[in-house]
Amino acid sequence: MIAWVLRPGRALVKILTDADSAQQIALGLAIGMMLGLVPKGNLVAVSLGILLFASRANLGAGALSAFAFTWAGLLLDPVSHRIGLGLLEFEALRPMWTWLFNLPVVPWTALNNTVVLGSLILGMALFYPVFRLSEPQVAMITPRICDHLVKYRVGKVLMGVDLVTRGAA
């Protein structure tokens, strides 16, 4: 019973104490941000999920980021709608949209939805800044958190250190 109570805490500790580099955690955060912003139930969201799993990104950081940005994405829907509407109504791009939506797979992407297209473009625009800004922060914070976790009993339990030492005794 205690195991399922500790599982979310252990997952968070695993994200921070894994042997992953700061770049892998930052990449997970950036891909998760894109995945969280895009509405689900289309080929774009599935492709971003596959990208998260196929890359060397930290999966825990990606999942945590996707969860957080899903809620932020709801607040950003009006902005995404304006971006998507502007792109879909841009006269110079109209032949490209017509050609794309006549292809067999593209309609499953739901890029004709203004919010999906706008969220994808917003996520692509924010990808590099999120990656570059989070990388030094993760590199700075991760060792501090690990040091603090080892000092306290709760941290040792979450890291699994206490359980290992009890089994050895």
Image (spheres, rainbow, N blue to C red):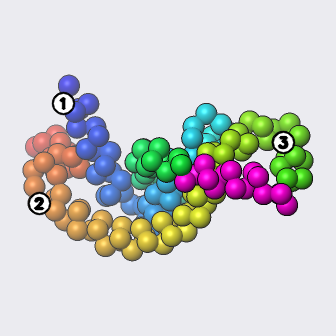
- Distance between the alpha carbons at the discs numbered 3 and 2: 58 Å
Identify residue for label 3: 101
Q: Amino acid at mark 3?
A: Phe
The circle on residue 2 is 1
Where the C terminus falls, by quadrant? top left
Is residue 21 visible in this depiction of the protein? Answer: yes
Pick the front one: 25 or 160 = 25
Residue count near mark 1 (Cα–Cα under 10 Å), binned few <14, some 14–19, many ≥20: few
Query: What secondary structure is marked by label 2?
Result: helix
Residue count near mark 3 (Cα–Cα under 10 Å), binned few <14, some 14–19, many ≥20: some
Pick the front one: 12 or 37 = 37
- Distance between the alpha carbons at the discs numbered 1 and 3: 51 Å
On screen, residue 90 above or below 1: below
In contact (CB < 8 Å): disc 3 and disc 2: no
Where the N terminus falls, by quadrant? top left
Specify the segment rendered in magenta. 79-93
